[in-house]
Image (tube, rainbow, N blue to C red):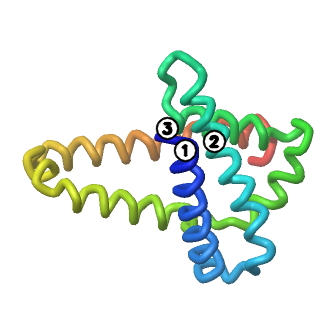
Amino acid sequence: MKIKDTIIILAIVTFMSLFSNVLGTKADIIQSIPGLLILAVIAFVGMLLSKYIPGGIPAAAWVVTLGCILTIPGVPGSDIINGYVKNVGFVALCTPILAYAGVSIGKDLDAFAKTGWRIVILAIVVFVGTYIASAIIAQCILKALGQI
Protein backbone atom coordinates (compact mmCIF):
# COMPACT_ATOMS: atom_id res chain seq x y z
CA MET A 1 0.00 0.00 0.00
CA LYS A 2 1.28 3.45 -0.85
CA ILE A 3 1.93 6.02 1.86
CA LYS A 4 -0.70 8.33 0.36
CA ASP A 5 -3.31 5.57 0.57
CA THR A 6 -2.32 4.82 4.16
CA ILE A 7 -2.75 8.48 5.12
CA ILE A 8 -6.15 8.66 3.44
CA ILE A 9 -7.37 5.50 5.17
CA LEU A 10 -6.08 6.66 8.55
CA ALA A 11 -7.79 10.03 8.05
CA ILE A 12 -11.10 8.33 7.25
CA VAL A 13 -10.81 5.97 10.24
CA THR A 14 -9.83 8.87 12.52
CA PHE A 15 -12.84 10.90 11.38
CA MET A 16 -15.17 7.92 11.87
CA SER A 17 -13.69 7.28 15.30
CA LEU A 18 -14.08 10.96 16.23
CA PHE A 19 -17.73 10.88 15.22
CA SER A 20 -18.27 7.63 17.11
CA ASN A 21 -16.39 8.88 20.19
CA VAL A 22 -18.39 12.10 20.42
CA LEU A 23 -21.71 10.28 20.03
CA GLY A 24 -20.87 7.21 22.09
CA THR A 25 -19.05 8.71 25.06
CA LYS A 26 -20.54 12.20 25.04
CA ALA A 27 -16.94 13.47 25.05
CA ASP A 28 -16.18 16.96 23.85
CA ILE A 29 -14.97 17.02 20.23
CA ILE A 30 -12.07 19.32 21.11
CA GLN A 31 -10.89 16.91 23.82
CA SER A 32 -11.17 13.91 21.50
CA ILE A 33 -9.19 15.26 18.54
CA PRO A 34 -5.67 15.25 20.10
CA GLY A 35 -6.03 11.68 21.38
CA LEU A 36 -7.26 10.40 18.04
CA LEU A 37 -4.49 12.23 16.18
CA ILE A 38 -1.89 10.69 18.51
CA LEU A 39 -3.36 7.23 17.84
CA ALA A 40 -3.36 7.90 14.09
CA VAL A 41 0.29 8.98 14.18
CA ILE A 42 1.24 5.87 16.16
CA ALA A 43 -0.61 3.72 13.60
CA PHE A 44 1.09 5.53 10.71
CA VAL A 45 4.57 5.13 12.20
CA GLY A 46 3.87 1.46 12.89
CA MET A 47 2.82 0.95 9.28
CA LEU A 48 5.97 2.72 8.05
CA LEU A 49 8.13 0.52 10.30
CA SER A 50 6.43 -2.57 8.91
CA LYS A 51 7.06 -1.42 5.36
CA TYR A 52 10.69 -0.36 5.68
CA ILE A 53 12.19 -2.61 8.36
CA PRO A 54 13.01 -6.07 7.06
CA GLY A 55 11.77 -9.17 8.82
CA GLY A 56 8.13 -9.32 7.77
CA ILE A 57 6.76 -8.17 11.14
CA PRO A 58 3.10 -7.18 10.65
CA ALA A 59 2.10 -3.54 10.99
CA ALA A 60 -0.28 -4.40 13.83
CA ALA A 61 2.64 -5.73 15.88
CA TRP A 62 4.61 -2.54 15.29
CA VAL A 63 1.64 -0.36 16.18
CA VAL A 64 0.94 -2.23 19.42
CA THR A 65 4.62 -2.27 20.40
CA LEU A 66 5.06 1.42 19.69
CA GLY A 67 1.86 2.29 21.53
CA CYS A 68 2.88 0.25 24.56
CA ILE A 69 6.36 1.78 24.70
CA LEU A 70 5.09 5.34 24.34
CA THR A 71 2.56 4.95 27.16
CA ILE A 72 4.73 3.23 29.77
CA PRO A 73 4.81 5.40 32.90
CA GLY A 74 8.19 7.07 33.13
CA VAL A 75 8.83 7.25 29.40
CA PRO A 76 9.25 10.90 28.43
CA GLY A 77 5.95 12.23 27.12
CA SER A 78 3.90 9.27 28.29
CA ASP A 79 1.88 11.42 30.70
CA ILE A 80 0.93 13.76 27.86
CA ILE A 81 0.02 10.90 25.52
CA ASN A 82 -1.99 9.10 28.21
CA GLY A 83 -3.74 12.34 29.14
CA TYR A 84 -4.98 12.91 25.61
CA VAL A 85 -5.72 9.30 24.70
CA LYS A 86 -7.83 8.71 27.82
CA ASN A 87 -10.50 10.89 26.17
CA VAL A 88 -10.96 8.30 23.41
CA GLY A 89 -13.36 5.45 24.10
CA PHE A 90 -12.48 1.90 23.08
CA VAL A 91 -15.81 1.42 21.31
CA ALA A 92 -15.11 4.48 19.16
CA LEU A 93 -12.03 2.74 17.79
CA CYS A 94 -13.82 -0.57 17.25
CA THR A 95 -16.63 0.91 15.17
CA PRO A 96 -14.66 1.62 11.95
CA ILE A 97 -12.65 -1.59 12.31
CA LEU A 98 -15.79 -3.71 12.61
CA ALA A 99 -17.42 -1.81 9.76
CA TYR A 100 -14.41 -2.55 7.56
CA ALA A 101 -14.44 -6.21 8.58
CA GLY A 102 -18.14 -6.44 7.75
CA VAL A 103 -17.65 -4.88 4.33
CA SER A 104 -14.64 -7.08 3.68
CA ILE A 105 -16.52 -10.27 4.57
CA GLY A 106 -19.59 -9.13 2.65
CA LYS A 107 -17.45 -8.53 -0.43
CA ASP A 108 -16.03 -12.07 -0.27
CA LEU A 109 -19.13 -13.84 0.99
CA ASP A 110 -18.67 -16.78 -1.38
CA ALA A 111 -15.15 -17.43 -0.09
CA PHE A 112 -16.38 -17.03 3.49
CA ALA A 113 -19.20 -19.54 2.92
CA LYS A 114 -16.72 -22.10 1.54
CA THR A 115 -14.81 -22.16 4.82
CA GLY A 116 -17.78 -23.87 6.43
CA TRP A 117 -18.59 -24.35 10.09
CA ARG A 118 -14.94 -24.84 11.08
CA ILE A 119 -14.34 -21.09 10.88
CA VAL A 120 -16.92 -20.55 13.64
CA ILE A 121 -15.11 -22.97 15.97
CA LEU A 122 -11.79 -21.34 15.13
CA ALA A 123 -13.19 -17.86 15.79
CA ILE A 124 -14.57 -18.92 19.18
CA VAL A 125 -11.24 -20.47 20.19
CA VAL A 126 -9.35 -17.36 19.08
CA PHE A 127 -11.74 -15.00 20.90
CA VAL A 128 -11.65 -17.01 24.13
CA GLY A 129 -7.87 -17.43 23.96
CA THR A 130 -7.36 -13.72 23.32
CA TYR A 131 -9.68 -12.80 26.18
CA ILE A 132 -7.97 -15.13 28.65
CA ALA A 133 -4.47 -14.07 27.58
CA SER A 134 -5.44 -10.38 27.84
CA ALA A 135 -6.90 -10.93 31.30
CA ILE A 136 -3.75 -12.73 32.47
CA ILE A 137 -1.47 -10.00 31.09
CA ALA A 138 -3.63 -7.24 32.62
CA GLN A 139 -3.66 -9.05 35.98
CA CYS A 140 0.14 -9.38 35.99
CA ILE A 141 0.76 -5.76 34.99
CA LEU A 142 -1.76 -4.30 37.42
CA LYS A 143 -0.34 -6.48 40.21
CA ALA A 144 3.23 -5.39 39.33
CA LEU A 145 2.16 -1.74 39.39
CA GLY A 146 0.48 -2.25 42.75
CA GLN A 147 -2.95 -1.16 41.53
CA ILE A 148 -4.63 -4.38 42.66
Q: Residue at x 81, y 42 (%)?
A: 146
Q: Amino acid at mark 2?
A: Gln
Disc 3, SS: helix
Camera-side residue: 121 or 5?
Answer: 5
Q: Amino acid at mark 3?
A: Ala
Dots 3 and 2: beta carbons under 8 Å? Answer: no
Q: How many marks?
A: 3
Q: Position of residue 38 (x, y in %)?
A: 74, 54
Q: Amino acid at mark 1?
A: Ala
Dots 1 and 3: beta carbons under 8 Å? Answer: yes
Residue 64: image quadrant is top right
Q: Position of residue 10 (x, y in %)?
A: 57, 56
Within 10 angstroms of label 1, few (less than 14), some, or many (20 or more) residues? few
Q: Residue at x 85, y 45 (%)?
A: 78
Tag shown at residue 46: none
Q: Which residue is mark 3?
A: 133
Dots 1 and 2: beta carbons under 8 Å? Answer: yes
Height in image: 83 above or below 16?
above
Height in image: 14 above or below 141?
below
Q: Which residue is mark 1?
A: 135
Disc 2, SS: helix
Within 10 angstroms of label 2, few (less than 14), some, or many (20 or more) residues? some
Question: How far is disc 3 from disc 2 in space, using C-alphas?
Answer: 10 Å
